[in-house]
Image (cartoon, rainbow, N blue to C red):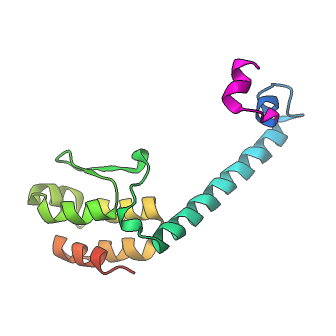
């Protein structure tokens, strides 16, 4: 078995798709990419809903979705955000939350696709209100 086949197991379709002549034209390739992107979006939506149902506050998000704060702290899940908000200094909080922006609301929406929670966080007037919103979410 070639090195390539070992990496992908017995899935010859994947191996075949790597051949330059696999697609009859670029339009076939574009259609396949569009279908794959749609499948990814549906999967992300499903996982977001599943996480919401089963204790998503404690589930770490993928590392590329971590939120790095000005002071170097890393937010990996909603529980982290809730805890960190209780202890970060005011300068760090105000760096991330101002009348012009709210990095926490943006992160919640981008990461969990939870528009209602993101809006509630954005409307919050101070850190204690954001903490309450997260603690009381359903």
Q: Position of residue 104 (x, y in %)?
A: 30, 62
The span picked out in magenta is 1-12
Instruction: Say above or below: 95 vs 63.
Output: below
Query: Would residue 19 be found to the left or right of residue 125 on screen?
Result: right
Nearest the viewer among 114 and 8 is: 8
Instruction: Say above or below: 96 vs 114.
Output: above
The residue lying furthest to the right in this view is 24
Q: Position of residue 22 (x, y in %)?
A: 85, 31
Q: Determine the residue positioned at 66% across, 28% down.
A: 7
Query: Would residue 40 be found to the left or right of residue 74 on screen?
Result: right
Q: Position of residue 105 (x, y in %)?
A: 34, 66
Q: Determine the residue positioned at 23% across, 58% down.
A: 96
On the question of residue 100 being in view, the answer is no
The residue lying furthest to the top in this view is 2
Q: Determine the residue positioned at 28% across, 76% down.
A: 135
Nearest the viewer among 97 and 113 is: 113
Q: Position of residue 20 (x, y in %)?
A: 81, 25
Nearest the viewer among 71 and 78 is: 78
Query: Would residue 101 be found to the left or right of residue 127 on screen?
Result: right
Tell me if residue 130 is in the magenta stretch: no
Q: Quadrant of the N terminus?
A: top right
Q: Determine the residue positioned at 10% across, 56% down.
A: 91
Instruction: Say above or below: 1 vs 117.
Output: above
The number of numbered badges drawn on the structure is 0
On the question of residue 38 being in view, the answer is yes
Q: Quadrant of the C terminus?
A: bottom left
Tell me if residue 6 is in the magenta stretch: yes
């Amino acid at each position: 078995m070639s090195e390539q086949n070992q990496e992908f197991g017995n899935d010859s379709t994947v191996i075949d798709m790597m051949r330059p002549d696999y697609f009859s034209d670029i339009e076939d390739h574009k259609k396949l990419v569009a279908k794959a992107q749609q499948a990814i979006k549906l999967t992300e939506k499903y996982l977001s809903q599943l996480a919401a149902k089963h204790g998503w506050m404690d589930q770490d998000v993928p590392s590329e979705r971590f939120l790095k704060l000005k002071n170097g702290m890393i937010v990996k899940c909603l529980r982290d955000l809730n805890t960190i908000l209780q202890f970060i200094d005011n300068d760090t909080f105000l760096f991330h939350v101002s009348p012009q922006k709210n990095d926490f609301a943006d992160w919640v929406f981008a990461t969990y696709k939870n528009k209602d929670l993101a809006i509630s966080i954005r409307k919050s007037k101070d850190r204690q209100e954001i903490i309450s919103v997260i603690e009381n979410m359903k």
